[in-house]
Image (spheres, rainbow, N blue to C red):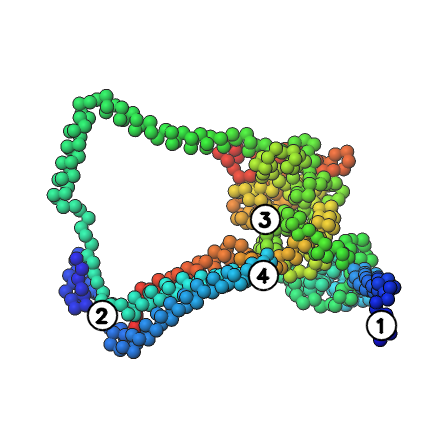
Amino acid sequence: MSTNTHDSHDELVVRHAPEGVSDPGLPPHTPRLGDSDPKAAKRSERIVAGLFGLSVIGSILVVVSFFVVKPEGTVESIQRSNMFLGLGLALALGGIGFAAVHWAKSLMNDHEKVEERHPQRSSEEDRAGAVAVLKEGAEDSGIARRSALKGGLITALALLPLPIALPLIGNVGADWKVSKFRHTMWKRGTRLMTDPTYRPIRAADVTIGSVVHVIPEGLNHEDLDHDQKFMDEKAKAVVLLVRLDERDLKHTEGSYHGIVAFSKICTHVGCPVALYEQQTHHLLCPCHQSTFDVSDGAKVVFGPAKRALPQLPISVDDEGYLVATDDFSEPIGPSFWERVK
Amino acid sequence: MKAIAARRHHRQAPVVLLVLALLVTGAVYAAFASTSADASVVAQTETDIEQGKKLFATNCASCHGLNAEGREAAPSLVGVGAASVYFQVSTGRMPMQSNAPQAEAKPPQFDEAETLQLAAYVASLGAGPAIPTAEQVDASKGDAAKGMALFRTNCAMCHAASGAGGALTQGKFAPSVLDTEPAQIYTAMATGPQSMPVFNDMTLTPEDKRDIIAFIDAQKEGAPGGLDLGSIGPVGEGLWVFIVGMGLLIGCAVWIGAKSS
């Protein structure tokens, strides 16, 4: 159902065009230079041949550089090898692609063609035939008479989704133990250790303006049986320890001579908040720019977070090392469904 | 010369050669050891402090006060230590160029000797972190793998995992550390300049600091993938794909659809 418009595009009929808008139809056909000038056609041919030639050179380049420019372990040699292979592949593939398109555009027949859409509705004959076939099948199966089979079929189909849905819902259920969101490894007497060097921290060694990334004592690969548990516990227990001039602190509860410890997990969506600006005492979350004021109980001063970072109350033990005096005052991290506030 | 050449097969020749070789090795070692010692030890003589005081009075005192006691515009420098002066002055951050969100690095205004004199003067006012020795900042003696773990936890959130730096709040930013001198990296960690917190010898021991320097040094080799687009993360890479990658694809589509002339 195609119309060759080269000589008849004026006859195209405008259908259902709203009033005032007329179908401009196809632009008039303009012959290409190559159609009339054999020199131009010859030039196009040379370009296409040249592009194929580039592709050949690219393929050869890949093969040669595979043997000659080998990655030898240094970053520089890997870069060089990648560059030659990539350049060769780009030429090999691009050459063929550009040649094919240029060939089609400049040398092959350029007559525009219009293909009308087929009507979507089937013919009346086909529709009647389909209904007849369905009716015949229903008749043949005797589903109206055989009620036991009808019941069996419906029951079987009704139960089928269960084996798919049950494991899905069951696995979701494993995460519904909200108690694990409420508590971390921290408890009274747990020493604060440096992350990742795992050394206890003497309060006297923390100078003003210092930041220490802290994990609880016992959070190491030896004491936790496998990596998954280690990561789960670490994800909840990480703490940022900061020492301020005591006079800058607005509240001193849970602090020790200007040393304060806050959960490193953002209360917005749980990114690690650790961009501490020593001069402003602001703690910035890199994900959505929530900003917490460490001198004022890590309350939110900017950004989408709604709650202050939970504070880890700290003190020192007999040897002068920093210890927690309790778990966090409230669940760490973003809000969840059973959280009170 | 001929006499020596004639005796080169003499029975004692290897012994003589060995003795000579030992002497040469010793001399070379002594020469190198003394130069490295010269570079590392900050000569804090009275004259240095005196010179530093003069430099301070003419270049720094207008903001920090004649005795470095600090004023409204600038903090006291008593007790900040030689390391702090070394970092601020050798990176050109001090003297500060303008009242911006943060003092930015620029070509230093003092040469190495003057910087050390200033540092000696400020260190004489009160104890503080000292300038590290050449050995303490020798990247080849550090463990880059351990440095990476330390960098990831302590530095990467501001300076980015690649060390290329990143934005902070209100016009402040963490600068790139990739072109920073090892001694400047060390003194920055030890003193916590401007927005940066302090990482003293308890938080990161001198060995830890050297490992971090080794890690940063290893980044200078470049990325094996080639063009790293400034290593500023997914935003820059996404922008590149959107503008350059998709631009090329759209260009191809337009070219394929256009009529040949």
User: For the residues marked 2 and 1, what is the alpha-carbon distance in whole angstroms?
Assistant: 98 Å
Q: Which of the two discs, 4 and 3, sits closer to the camera? A: 4
Percent from the top left, x then y, of residue A110? 25, 67
Give the number of the mark in front: 3 or 2: 2
User: Residue at 76% of width from left, 37% of height from top?
Assistant: A320
Q: Quadrant of the N terminus of chain A?
A: bottom left
* Position of residue B107 measured from the top left corner of the image (x, y, whole percent): 67, 67
Q: Give the chain of mark 4.
A: A
Please, what secondary structure does the residue beneath circle 4 have? helix
Q: Residue at x 38, y 62 (%)?
A: B250
Q: Nearer the viewer, mark 2 or mark 1?
A: 1
Query: Nearer the viewer's eye, disc 1 or disc 4?
Result: 1
The CA span between labels 3 and 2 is 63 Å
* Mark 1 burial class by Cα count in 10 Å: few <14, some 14-19, many 20+: few
Q: Looking at this rendering, what residue extends furthest in the top direction? A: A148
Query: Numbered disc 1: what chain?
Result: B
Residue B154 visible in rendering: no
In the picture, residue A104 is in which quadrant? Answer: bottom left
**Neighbourhood count class around disc 2 (C-alpha, 10 Å): few under 14, some 14–19, many 20 upward:** few
Per the model, the C-alpha gap separating discs 4 and 2 is 55 Å
User: Which residue is label 1 attached to?
Assistant: B6
Which dot marks residue A8? none
Q: Are marks 4 and 2 on the same chain?
A: yes
Q: Give the chain of mark 2.
A: A
Let me know if residue B111 appears in the view.
Answer: yes
Give whichever of discs 4 and 2 has the lower sequence position: 2
Mark 4 neighbour class, 10 Å CA radius: few under 14, some 14 to 19, many 20 or more:
some
